[in-house]
Amino acid sequence: MRSTTTQNDQVVRVEHALTKDPREFASRLGPVASGVRARSEQKEGFRADVYAAHLRKLGLFTVRIQNAHVERPPNPYVAITVPVSGPLQFFRNREGTAFHPDSAHILHATEDLDLRIGPMRGLFVATFDEAWIDRASRRLTESQHYCDLHEDWKLDLRASAGASFRHFLDFLWAETCRGAQFTRSELAVREIEHTCTTLLILASEEPGHRIAVDPGSGFRPGALERAEEYLRENLTEPFSLDKLIAIAGTSASTLLREFRKRHGMPPLQYLKLRRLEAARRELLSAEPVEVTVTDVATYYGFYHLGRFAGYYRDTFGELPSETLKRCGSGRLT
């Protein structure tokens, strides 16, 4: 069994800076939001409190900032800004638009950022590599380019898809601040980033750009079986909805509906159940002195060992450590 920990077994670090210098503020954001410039709107009033973390394809940061004018020229990343403590005023061609906590501002790679802040405001920002989103959107939707999906610059966080995206961002940030244990599993990192990107694409669709329609009428024979077979044979590949609908030859909405009809669960939950079964087989055949529960759990993308143990017990009626002990004396590391 291959190792699944990331390089040097390092978790993501959350960097913190409290600064009154606009240049230091811009420097601190460099790893997650390159090209940002800031200047004080008042002679001595600039203040920013920044927490930032950089994953592989994603950047995340929270800021509390006052009396600032923040700019960014076109850059090869998309930025999603969510106000968290009052409205934020963004400008485009001298026309200002206020964004409240129930919506988010979408800054595409080809656009300039013009954000003007007066009293202390909080914001949460996620940055995505645009080329990566483009590739996913072409597979997932009818659109040829991510920017085509949303001509406006506002993302509604009250709608179902928008709320799912926001909740996932909150989950990801919370996990990151708790030590980013998911980064110990290569599979978990890739899967989390795929999921976050997919949710963004779904949330930013306009009514005229719905998820790609079925290539034929109805649900083609064998489509669900092809999807099931792919998931079973690729347990250590990250879940990717765009890839799954391409394999099934149907739309996302149809595939999700058919999975629920047959299995009572969406494809990702189906995949996790298959991974649990594979983990059990691994534990039953393992040499306890050579393999730990941690080895097996992280290999199959279960980075939170407490949750893995709970899922395992609920499914099989015993803890994974108890399964491993059948081969001798095992331990949960």
Image: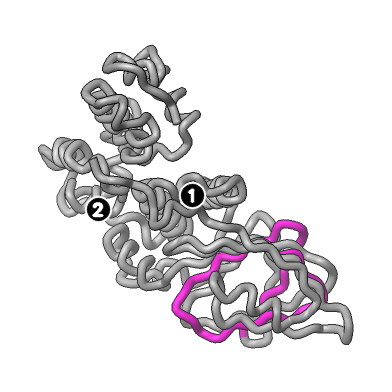
* Residue 74 location (% of width, % of height): 51, 84
The numbered mark, 1 or 2, whose residue comes first in the sequence reads 1
Query: Looking at the rendering, which quadrant does residue 207 occupy?
Result: bottom left
Which sits in the foreground, 36 or 186? 186
User: Is residue 128 something that shows in the picture?
Assistant: yes
Q: Residue drawn at (37%, 61%), measured in percent from left and top?
A: 209
Position of 141 relative to 73 (above/below): above
Q: Which residues are magenta?
A: 63-92
Q: Which residue is mark 2?
A: 243
Q: What label sits on residue 273 in the rendered view?
A: none
Q: Is residue 48 left or right of residue 139?
A: right
Query: Looking at the rendering, which quadrant does residue 302 occupy?
Result: top left
Label 2 packing within 10 angstroms: few (<14), some (14-19), many (20+): some
Q: Magenta span: helix, strand or loop, mainly?
A: strand
Position of 331 relative to 2 (above/below): above
Q: What label sits on residue 161 in the rendered view?
A: 1
Which sits in the foreground, 85 or 21? 21
Element class at badge 2? helix
* Residue 75 location (% of width, % of height): 49, 81
Q: Residue furthest left?
A: 221
The type of residue carrying mark 1 is Ala
Q: CA distance from mark 1 to mark 2?
A: 20 Å
Q: Residue furthest right?
A: 44
